[in-house]
Amino acid sequence: MRVPGSVALVTGGASGLGAGVVRTLADRGGRAVILDLPSSSGEAMADEMGEAVAFVPVDIADAGHVGHAVAAAAEAHGRIDVLVNCAGISSGQRVVSRDGAPNPLDHFRRHIEVNLIGLFDVARHATSAMAGNEPNDEGERGLIVNIASIAGYEGQVGQSAYGSSKAGVIGLTLPMARDLAVWGIRVMAIAPGTMDTPMLATLNEEFIAKLVDDNVFPHRLGMPADVGKLVAHFMENVFLNGEVVRLDAGLRLTSS
Ligand SMILES: NC(=O)c1ccc[n+]([C@@H]2O[C@H](COP(=O)([O-])OP(=O)(O)OC[C@H]3O[C@@H](n4cnc5c(N)ncnc54)[C@H](O)[C@@H]3O)[C@@H](O)[C@H]2O)c1
């Protein structure tokens, strides 16, 4: 699959890594549809980027609306070739509070609902749209790229909810690829390390500096364009399938 002329549906495309994917693909001649919250800056970004980028507002955890939103996204440029699932939330909460009382269950549930169930819901609707594509010379109809996290392998203190949701994303990569092989749709995942986005900005500077210091090389934050470049490579390399690629400068998270 070539980037020029392809259409990518990017959840969470209004910010951070998703916005990086949208910009990288558009720079290389692709088109995109941003699927993000109504309160996001998706509309402004689509206006700024012109015809190549459209915006469809939706909460991916709102099961009653995801199907309509994906259908509207498929109409925007007439097709979907790639789905990049970037939408996600992250906040910390320990299992119990300092005095030993159980912390609220809603925190855990919300992370699973957005990061895992919402991602799967968008994927099943987008797959349905891709299934109608004419296969290319390799028999390929589409590609799904799910954004996991290295916290899905080695989550830190307070990351039970986030780490579990991302471990779920890692776990569904291979079975989803196997399911969708019959349609010529590949499934890949990226497990980013410490990336320079608004999500990271919620952490304190000292903590971020330690994470960057723990990188093997290079000692800098990952950039949204690093993710964009990897997605473009996945599109162009049909032999990649069913795999999670760590994009983390060699970082292995410690417990805190
Ligand atoms: N920043 C990092 O260091 C890092 C590291 C590893 C993984 N990730 C993952 O990368 C993805 C992108 O994160 P980011 O750092 O760009 O964060 P971000 O906060 O900049 O972007 C997340 C986007 O998702 C959207 N979103 C959130 N909940 C949504 C919902 N219910 N429905 C629709 N859209 C929703 C937000 O509006 C936002 O535009 C997330 O899945 C995150 O877990 C980030």
Image (cartoon, rainbow, N blue to C red):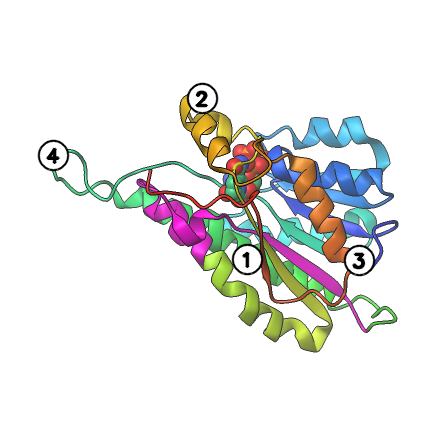
Disc 1/disc 2 C-alpha distance (Å): 35 Å
In this rendered view, identify the residue nearer to me: 176 or 156.
156
* Residue underneath mark 1: 121
Label located before the other in sequence (3 or 2): 2
Q: Quadrant of residue 15?
A: top right
Secondary structure of the residue carrying numbered label 4: loop
Magenta stretch in the rendered image = 139-167
Closer to the camera: disc 2 or disc 4?
2
Closer to the camera: disc 3 or disc 2?
2
- Looking at the image, is 103 positioned above or below residue 189? above
Residue 241 x/y as whole percent: 66, 66
Disc 3/disc 1 C-alpha distance (Å): 25 Å
Check disc 4 and give the amino acid type.
Answer: Asp
Residue 205's disc is 2
* Residue underneath mark 4: 99
Q: Residue at x 40, y 50 (%)?
A: 154
Residue 155 x/y as whole percent: 38, 47
* Residue underneath mark 3: 236
Secondary structure of the residue carrying numbered label 1: helix
Label located before the other in sequence (2 or 4): 4
Label 2: few (<14), some (14–19) or many (≥20) C-alpha neighbours in 10 Å: few
